[in-house]
Amino acid sequence: MKSICLVTALTVSDFIDPDLTAGANSNTGAQLGVLTLAALLRQQAYDPCIVNLDDLFFEFVRLDTTRPSINREGVAPLQPSESFYSFVASHLPAQSFDVVGLSSICGSYPLTLRLAQEIRRTNPQAKIILGGPQASVVDVATLNAFPCVDIIVRGEADDTFPSLLELFDSEAWQTMPGITFRRDNEVIRNPNAPVVENLDRLPLPAFDLDLRLKDRGGVHLEIGRGCPFACTFCSTNDFFRRNFRLKSPSRMIADIVSLKNEYGLGYFSLVHDMYTIDRKKVMAFCDAVLESGEKFTWGCSARTDCIDDELLELMARAGCTGIFFGIETGSQRLQHVINKKLDLAEAVQRIACADPGRARAGYDIALWVVHDLLDRGGMPAMRQLMTRLGRGETIATAVPRNGDTCPRADTAAGPDKEECASTLT
């Protein structure tokens, strides 16, 4: 039986504010894709190990003495020269694995590649497999630039990754859909694999592998996949093939009740890029929750043009206490440039309807606005609303910290960092 290690992508960093990042630890866990893969592998009698980079980042911040505002009572400080990359490298499992899978997102992809290089150095016989949204869209470029990577699983890996492991002992794996790999010196890109149409058939993620789950105050729970919109900046619409799917209300409630009873958790962040698109299915879930008599709270993501007052009130009665609205920009012109196409005047009205200071529903509202786009001719009403809500905008930046996430020539087993950057963007 092959030994398997799964490494999550780094989804948090101190790009914005390290103290705020550290404070977010309560609601952050291993990515659901990795935990779902672990559950699927267990069904095939594998015993996967998980390395959670977000948890390691929080530990790194806590040990960094340059951040005086974080409580470090009883912990040994970092060495002055220690970077997050070296910190993670020192915490990789010492044992050798037959297969190492690394998840990826755009913001931390260079770090993922550096870790792949380090794993290749210390575990030269391992099969190194990348997956996730970023690796899926730069698969050929990655394999051309980084010989340490053996295979990239594109798109949803729930069926592809376990099947790949079963076929490694023969050459049959090279015919599998949904993978990009290297044969001799040639990069081969097989056709796409189909998406998982029936999400109810997937097991509950292996939450027991998140050793800090009970301390997080809540849990992320995937309830569906796929957004039918085509915003130009978004990778997930292509990753999930713009194929909108939801789990059934009965399955969603069963998972929530199971986690509530086993871990004592009462808040669930229901993960779907665009949950409220199918109004009837949202209403069916809310009605099922009310009929069940189960008590828990939950949050979700929504577009401001895919929700209304009646639905807001029903969701609130069914336990919804928070909504994440991705506004992206306060400029109506840029709304069209990025193909988001929200009517900002309508967005302001819709968010105001969920404002806990005015609405019966009383939601906790989170807004995502790219700061630079807001400042360049953004909409004053949007800023005024965010100020009145006492939230301010969430600022998206991309400032690498001391080269921690950037491939460097002294560690790259291939092109220098400028060439890597131009190749992978």
Image (tube, rainbow, N blue to C red):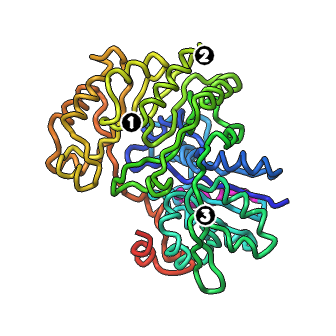
- Image side of residue 45 versus residue 76, left or right: right
| Total numbered labels placed on residues in the image | 3
How far, Cα to Cα, is label 1 from label 2?
Answer: 24 Å
- Give the number of the mark in front: 2 or 3: 2
Q: Is residue 17 left or right of residue 135?
A: left
Q: Nearer the viewer, residue 124 or 274?
A: 274
The three-letter code of the residue at mark 1 reads: Ala
Q: Are marks 2 and 3 in contact (CB under 8 Å)?
A: no
Query: Pointer 3: residues within 10 angstroms few (<14), some, or many (20+)?
Result: many
Query: Residue at (66%, 46%) from the top-left corner?
Result: 36
| Disc 1 from disc 3: Cα separation | 29 Å
Q: Position of residue 184 (x, y in %)?
A: 66, 86
Q: Is residue 255 magenta?
A: no
The three-letter code of the residue at mark 2 reads Ser
From where the camera sits, is residue 76 visible?
Answer: no
**Vertical order, 103 against 383 (above or below):** below
Mark number displayed over residue 302: 1
Real-space Cα separation, disc 2 to disc 3, in angstroms: 39 Å
Q: Which residue was labeled with disc 3?
A: 153
Residue lying at 80% horizontally and 74% vertically, measured from the top left: 170
The disc, 1 or 2, on the residue closer to the chain's N-terminal end is 2
Which contiguous range is marked in magenta?
Answer: 82-94
Which callout, 1 or 2, points to the residue nearer the camera?
A: 2
Q: Quadrant of residue 100?
A: bottom right
Q: Which residue is mark 2?
A: 292
